[in-house]
Amino acid sequence: MGTDSHAPRDKTVLLINPNTNSNTTAMMVDLAAETLASHGLRVTGITAAAGPSMIVDPESLAESAEHVREAAHGYLSGPDGGRVAAVIVAAIGDPGREQLDRELEIPVVGIGQGSLDAAAHHPDGHLRRFAMATSTPLLVEALGKLVAAHGFQESFAGVRLTESEPLVLAADPERQYRELAHAVSAASEKDGADAVIIAGGPLSATARRLAESTSVAIIQPVPSACRLLLTLLAKDS
């Protein structure tokens, strides 16, 4: 994504896609902009320079943390770095988020972090039971660790998986939608989840479609991270 030389200072949110698929980056930038633009924030996207097109296993998730850090520091050390108000790490496992949060003086939010915050808290304020639906079986353990790291394990109903592999579904949006819809139904009806996170940045378009077509509360990772980010920025102002 390009940058706007006329953007006001400290009004840019840097979205980093740890997956090396630039189309996914563009999709998530557009989703983030829908939430942030009305608050005077512009979203600039960066795609990881190395790694897989879609993170599907613990090894690539761990390796992507350094790619995220390199992307962030590379941009922030450039001519437009001073314009950045915050950073979004746009992969559900939040690779590199904790390190960047320690290293930077601006808010750093992960879409996993934002999703958990939105899923665990009902809009009226009380805690609710939630689950995840995803296409990446090898990341189930990592997702469970993320839940525990944020202290929501007592509200967590577990992970429901699609039948097909993630890259197969990435190439077939209709099949992806049908299989994730089935996983959402199972999480609600069998696991007692009141809300379901569609766990994966590349699943963002399907997450939106599910939110518009099901009665279950669907948690969309990118918009959830944006709302958490706005809360943090308001506290810092």
Image: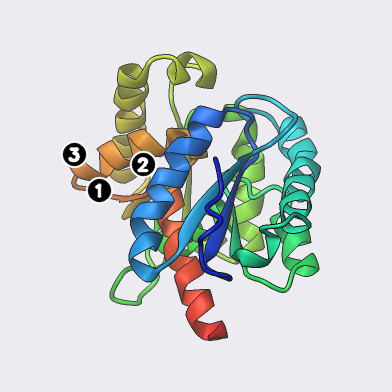
Amino acid type, callout 1: Val
Residue 186 occupies quadrant: top left
- Label 2 near label 1: C-beta < 8 Å? yes
Q: Nearer the viewer, residue 206 or 138?
A: 206
Q: Nearer the viewer, residue 132 or 10?
A: 10
Amino acid type, callout 3: Ser
Circle 2 packing at 10 Å, graded few (<14), some (14-19), many (20+), is many
Is disc 3 placed on a helix, strand or loop? helix
Asked if 6 appears above or below 94 in the picture, the reply is: below
3D distance between C-alphas at marks 2 and 3: 16 Å
Give the residue number, with chain letter if any, for mark 1.
216
Residue at left 46%, top 45%? 29
Give the residue number, with chain letter if any, for mark 3.
213
Residue at left 78%, top 59%? 99
Front tag of 2 and 3: 3
Asked if 72 appears above or below 54 in the picture, the reply is: below
Is disc 1 placed on a helix, strand or loop? loop
Front tag of 3 and 1: 3
**Which x, y percent locates residue 134?**
47, 34
Give the residue number, with chain letter if any, for mark 2.
187
Pick out the residue farthest to the front.
6
